[in-house]
Image (cartoon, rainbow, N blue to C red):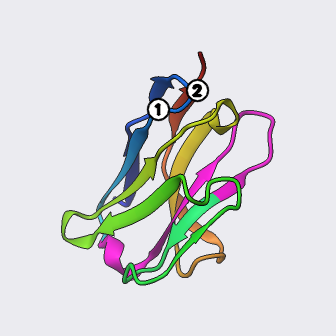
């Protein structure tokens, strides 16, 4: 059964860091691009970052450029989102998703992990 499970969210203060993980099971992650998105209940979904299947190409939303870094370890069937210098406006539910290519439709997604940035 295809499954994506995120972890690593939590409550941090502004300026601190978190590392989100996305573990895939039931399929090989290396066939897909991986996107990280964020969406709070009642709000629009925002694409945060995406990495190609090989890891050779990455994309970031302007709001996170220079602060977030996406990576993947295909041997571990896992993707990561390193988030540094977190700001209150980064507060959201973050989830990972697989896409055939970055900016393409989502094929499957995880349940998400909550990130709260507050002093």
Q: Quadrant of the N terminus?
A: bottom left
Question: Residue at 52% across / 22% down in the picture?
Answer: 13
Q: Which residue is mark 2?
A: 117
Of residues 42 and 57, the one nearer the viewer is: 57
> Which element is circle 2 on?
strand
Along the viewing direction, whichever of 71 and 1 lies nearer the viewer = 71
Q: Position of residue 89 (x, y in %)?
A: 70, 35
Q: Is residue 106 magenta?
A: no
- CA gap between label 1 and label 2 equals 8 Å
Q: Earlier in the sequence, mark 1 or mark 2?
A: 1
What residue is drawn where x is 70% and y is 53%?
A: 63
**Point 53% across, 32% down: residue:** 15
Q: Is residue 24 above or below residue 112?
A: below
- Comparing 91 with 2, the one in front is 91
- Crowd around label 2: few <14 · some 14–19 · many ≥20 (10 Å): some
- Residue 11 vertical position relative to residue 84 in the rendered view, above or below: above
Asked if the residue under mark 2 is in contact with the one under mark 1, i.e. CB atoms within 8 Å, the reply is yes
Q: Was residue 34 drawn as part of the magenta stretch in this picture?
A: yes
Q: Look at 65% across and 73% down and name the residue there.
A: 105
Q: What stretch of residues is rendered in magenta? A: 28-47
Query: From the viewer's perspective, is residue 83 above or below residue 115?
Result: below
Residue 8 coordinates in the image, percent (x, y) = 38, 37
- Residue for badge 1: 16
- Left or right: residue 72 versus residue 102 is left
Kindly state the secondary structure of the residue where label 1 is placed. Answer: loop
On screen, residue 111 above or below 36: above
Count of numbered tags: 2
């Amino acid at each position: 059964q295809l499954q994506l499970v995120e972890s690593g969210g939590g409550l941090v203060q502004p300026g601190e860091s978190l590392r989100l993980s996305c573990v895939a099971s039931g399929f090989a992650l290396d066939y897909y691009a991986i996107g990280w998105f964020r969406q709070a209940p009642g709000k629009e979904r925002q694409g945060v970052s995406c990495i190609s299947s090989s890891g050779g190409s990455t994309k970031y939303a302007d709001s996170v450029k220079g602060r977030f870094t996406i990576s993947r370890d295909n041997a571990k069937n896992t993707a990561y989102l390193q988030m540094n210098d977190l700001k209150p406006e980064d507060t959201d539910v973050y989830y990972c998703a697989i896409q055939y290519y970055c900016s393409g439709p989502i094929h499957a997604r995880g349940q998400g992990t909550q990130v709260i940035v507050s002093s």
